[in-house]
Image (cartoon, coloured by chain):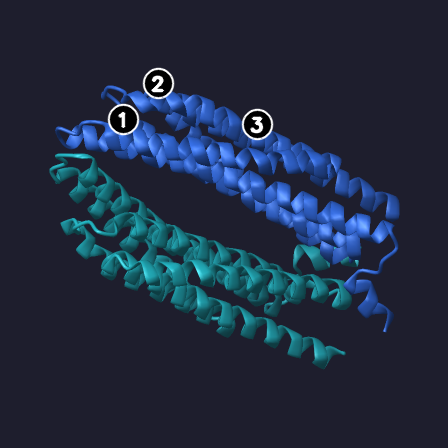
Chain colours: A blue, B cyan
Amino acid sequence: MERHFHEQLQELKKKLTTMSRSVEESIEKSIRSFMLRDAGLADEVFRMDDVINRMEMDIDDDCLKLLALQQPLAADLRFIMAAMKINNDLERMGDHSVNIAGYAKSLIGTEAVPPINRIPAMAKIALGMVSESLAAFVEGDADRARLVCLKDDEVDAMDDAIFKEVLRLPHPGPESVSRSLALVLASKNIERIADLSTNIAEEVIFIVQARTIKHHSELSVIEDRRAR
Amino acid sequence: MERHFHEQLQELKKKLTTMSRSVEESIEKSIRSFMLRDAGLADEVFRMDDVINRMEMDIDDDCLKLLALQQPLAADLRFIMAAMKINNDLERMGDHSVNIAGYAKSLIGTEAVPPINRIPAMAKIALGMVSESLAAFVEGDADRARLVCLKDDEVDAMDDAIFKEVLRLPHPGPESVSRSLALVLASKNIERIADLSTNIAEEVIFIVQARTIKHHSELSVIEDRRAR
């Protein structure tokens, strides 16, 4: 049973990694659709969202079953709860890529505004944060997770820079305002993706620390209560 | 023990209701700070965020302890998992009110743009959705939850209307663009609050349906697996 449970936790990690790859692909496609004003790519993002939503439900179901059937304690329980949260964070990232693809569609047939050139570099950092936060989770590596958290400030600064650059643009008519709004909103959605990766990284730090405390044989609150 | 567990679930409901009240107050304050361009109110929202974050951690900890100590099955397990998700949704609403308060601060000393007048009505619906989704959760009332989901379209339509009205405004200089961006972003944040309430309502429908299926003595997957 114990061995079987261990395999199920490995399976859960694998599913989350697969989901993360799909989310990264969806974000990457949404950015390309935004930069190229490509409706076909945007539609692919919309289709991928259904797949990502189904993945989320499947993983949620796995977590529920693990909790019900295995009744895990302490470290394993924390791990499954973290998996549930990460699952939710990844699904929300998928929603942000859908938003970006939607803004891409609103830009079709228009010219790009100059600050759009800041988007690829910003998206690249955010995408790196997504894959690194998942890797940190799979490896249980708190140092790697801390590096993800540090990157968040860079993305925030880039989002601010885009906002400020947009303010300096001339806006002679509704079309230019529309392009600027789409750009600012896309930037905010990338910034939210980075935030969600930071959430995942913080979750990893939390579960690793909890385990470390246990290894130093300080009883966790739960075990303390159990003992009474 | 069973009775004690039931009391703990009631306590969990109470804590989530208290948290929801704080989140509603924070949203309401952020909207007032935005409408009045009032820095003091915005600062109150920032301070409330710390309180809301601590509430989230406390509730998360309660859920973890309930799972570890009581090892609940089926319906109770689902309920605790739903509570965890609702807790997370409420905390994110708090983050959105912080964003709105931030936009309020960026508007200080500026004149209001006309579509801002649509914000209070939109915020009122979103706030109603927050409190109704929580009431549906506490009462386990799927019909009440379904009404919350229906309201989401109204908020989306209002967000769209603000966006379109902003596009028609003249934007002679950076200051007017800044005001328009702040307004569109505030509107998007209210729309996200409505989305998160819809998430909560869907969670309620899910747990009530699972219970109903059980009452009709169709075995859930979990129980089916247990029986093997």
> Which type of secondary structure does the marked residue at label 2 adopt?
helix
Percent coordinates x, y for residue B165 in the rendering: 16, 44
Q: Quadrant of the C terminus of chain B?
A: bottom right
- Amino acid type at circle 2 is Leu
> What residue is shown at x 25% (from left), y 33% (from top)?
A167
- Chain label for disc 3: A
Distance between the Cα atoms at labels 3 and 2?
A: 21 Å
- The residue most toward the bottom is B3
Give the amino acid type for the residue marked by disc 1 in the picture: Leu
Element under disc 3: helix
The circle drawn on residue A107 is: 1
The correct choice, above or below, for B59 with respect to A12 in the image is below
Q: Residue at x 65, y 38 (%)?
A: A146
Q: Earlier in the sequence, mark 3 or mark 2?
A: 2
Give the image quarter of residue B66: bottom right
Badges 3 and 1, same chain: yes
Dot 1: what SS?
helix
Give the residue at mark 2: A36
Question: Label 3 vs label 1: CA separation?
Answer: 26 Å
Distance, label 1 to label 2, CA atoms, is 9 Å
Q: Nearer the viewer, residue A20 or A187?
A: A187
Of mark 3 and mark 1, the one earlier in the sequence is 1
Residue drawn at x 62%, y 59% as measured from the top left: B81
